[in-house]
Image (cartoon, rainbow, N blue to C red):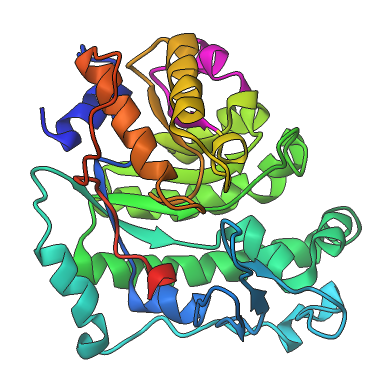
């Protein structure tokens, strides 16, 4: 089976002889609009993203994050958000689109899904703009203003989607938005359904109505209580599902409605002192306990194919390959690992 056929069998509950191996089925592509909104991403540096948010990306952390200290926060008063929040541009020249189009044209679509990498999502944009604490408070104290701001962010996402679809015609979407900590969702399912669910029903509904067959949502967090809402949004694969969500129970309860990619928590294995023995033990343990080739894709929970510390992602790929072949021994290094064009490596 091709990687594309294998993941479709996985999420449809069809017979499979192998586990889908991490991101093997997906080719990720960055578009110029997303890159413009993200800003100049450089490890060890700071910059302003397209929304005017000051971003930080220290060495040896999984990803960038906003500096929402008082002197830098974009929204100081949610009732006056229109004065400081300005939508980044989404229209770019054909020359600016050329690198993404060229990359897509080189991908074998019979083998792989082509997916734009969209980040950050609606919830993350909210707390990027005002800070996490203020964001939480504003859901309670200023719901009308929050709904207005969310509608504005949805408007941006739909403009972005139209441009991406028109230029690269993706058949999948890889969309980031972290919705929880390791122990709980950031907001209750009831509040999530009031503010976040309607936004994604519009966004994901648009992508699916325009040719996207597979919708993968990244949230490396606890989110088991939000799975019914994920299903309503149309998510096919929750990528980043940490093992603390009780993946065996999720597969049993929701398999056939949504699938789960993750289980191998980076916090456990992606360390400077990692060893092959410890990685292999953790990977085989997770696969053994979930015990399902359908509705489950063993993988790290990081939001792209890669790892903070070199070699971790590649070796986990090798372990899963050994499991698929029935081998008790991991073969020598295999460099045939599917990786995206990543802006973070530029």
Which corner quadrant of the image does residue 318 belong to? top left
Q: Is residue 161 magenta?
A: no
- Asked whether residue 218 appears in the rendered view, the answer is yes
Rendering quarter of residue 82: bottom right
- Image: magenta residue range: 245-264
> Of 289 and 116, which appears nearest the observer?
289
In this rendering, the answer to whether 122 lies above or below 171 is below
* Above or below, 265 relative to 108: above
Query: Which residue is pictured at 21% across the width and 66% down the height?
Result: 168
Image quadrant occupied by the C terminus: bottom left
Residue 148 visible, this orientation = no
Q: Quadrant of residue 294?
A: top left
Q: Looking at this view, is 276 or 5 the one in front?
A: 276
Q: Nearer the viewer, residue 40 or 73?
A: 40
Task: Identify the residue at horizontal 14%, vertical 73% (top origin).
Answer: 102
Q: Is residue 255 magenta?
A: yes
Q: Is residue 285 above or below residue 276?
A: above
Quadrant where the N terminus is found in the figure? top left
């Amino acid at each position: 089976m091709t990687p594309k056929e294998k993941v479709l069998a996985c999420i449809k509950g069809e017979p499979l002889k192998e586990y889908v191996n991490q991101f093997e089925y997906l080719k990720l592509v960055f578009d110029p609009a997303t890159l413009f909104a993200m800003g100049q991403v450089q490890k060890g540096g700071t910059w302003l993203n397209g929304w005017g948010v000051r971003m930080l990306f220290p060495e040896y952390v999984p990803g960038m994050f906003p500096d929402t200290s008082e002197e830098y926060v974009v929204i100081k008063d949610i009732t006056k958000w229109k004065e400081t929040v300005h939508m980044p541009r989404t229209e770019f020249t054909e020359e600016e689109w050329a690198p993404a189009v060229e990359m897509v044209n080189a991908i074998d679509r019979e083998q792989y899904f082509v997916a734009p990498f969209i980040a950050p999502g609606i919830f993350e944009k909210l707390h990027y703009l005002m800070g996490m604490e203020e964001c939480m408070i504003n859901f309670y104290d200023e719901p009308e203003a929050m709904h207005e701001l969310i509608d504005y962010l949805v408007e941006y996402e739909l403009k972005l989607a139209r441009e991406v679809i028109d230029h690269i015609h993706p058949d999948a979407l890889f969309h980031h938005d972290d919705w929880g900590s390791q122990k709980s969702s950031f907001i209750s399912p009831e509040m999530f359904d009031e503010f976040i669910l309607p936004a994604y029903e519009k966004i994901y509904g648009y992508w699916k109505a325009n040719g996207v067959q597979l919708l993968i949502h990244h949230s490396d967090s606890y989110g088991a209580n939000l799975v019914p809402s994920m299903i309503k949004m149309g998510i096919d694969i929750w990528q980043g599902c940490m093992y603390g969500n009780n993946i065996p129970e999720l597969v049993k309860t929701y398999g056939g409605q949504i699938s789960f990619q993750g289980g191998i928590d980076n916090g456990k294995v992606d360390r400077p002192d990692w060893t092959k023995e410890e990685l292999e033990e953790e990977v085989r343990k997770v696969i053994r306990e979930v015990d399902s080739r359908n509705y489950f894709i063993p993988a790290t929970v990081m939001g792209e194919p890669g790892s903070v510390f070199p070699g971790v992602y590649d070796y986990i790929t090798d372990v899963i390959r050994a499991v698929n072949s029935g081998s008790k021994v991991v073969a020598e290094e295999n460099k045939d690992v599917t990786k995206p064009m990543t802006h973070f490596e530029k």
